[in-house]
Image (spheres, grey):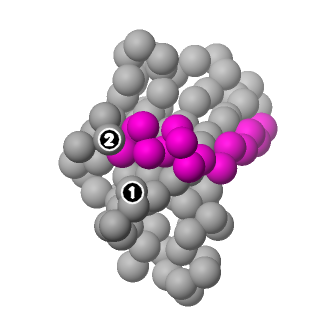
Amino acid sequence: MKKVLALTLALSALSQTASATGEYKYGWMTGNLPGTDIIAANVVREPAFAGERDEQAQAMDQAKRALEADYCAKQDSEFVVDPGLIVFDKGINEWLVGGVCR
């Protein structure tokens, strides 16, 4: 399921970057899993994420902003993360954060 979601995101993504206050620069791609209500964002950071717990919170904040802007605002709702759809990919140092608009 996670590989399918990541592949779907890669194929149907909207890519963005943003500078955060201070030393971090974030980038993300958002997408939805066709046939479901699931939306997700792949979040990267410069300097690269290492998979730490506090980084997960940073990635979730970035994903929430991006997903609400790209999907939830159209439905007058907000992004709600699914804890089972938060994954750190050590191979490319990115967080995948998924959930639904409610």
- Label 2 amino acid? Val
Residue found 72% across the figure and 31% down from its top: 25
Check the image and name the residue furthest to the bottom.
76
Q: Is residue 97 left or right of residue 75?
A: left
- Which label sits on residue 4? 2
Labels 2 & 1 near each other (Cβ < 8 A): yes
- Is 40 drawn above or below residue 76 in the view shown? above
Percent across and percent down for residue 83 are 25, 51
- Label 1 amino acid? Leu
Percent across and percent down for residue 3 are 31, 35
Element type where label 1 sits in the image: loop
35 and 22: which is toward the camera = 35
Q: Is residue 11 left or right of residue 98?
A: right
Element type where label 2 sits in the image: helix
Q: Is residue 24 left or right of residue 51?
A: right
Q: CA distance from mark 2 to mark 1?
A: 8 Å
Residue found 23% across the figure and 43% down from its top: 1
Q: Which residues are magenta?
A: 5-19
User: Would you name the residue on which mark 1 appears?
Assistant: 33
Q: Is residue 86 visible?
A: no
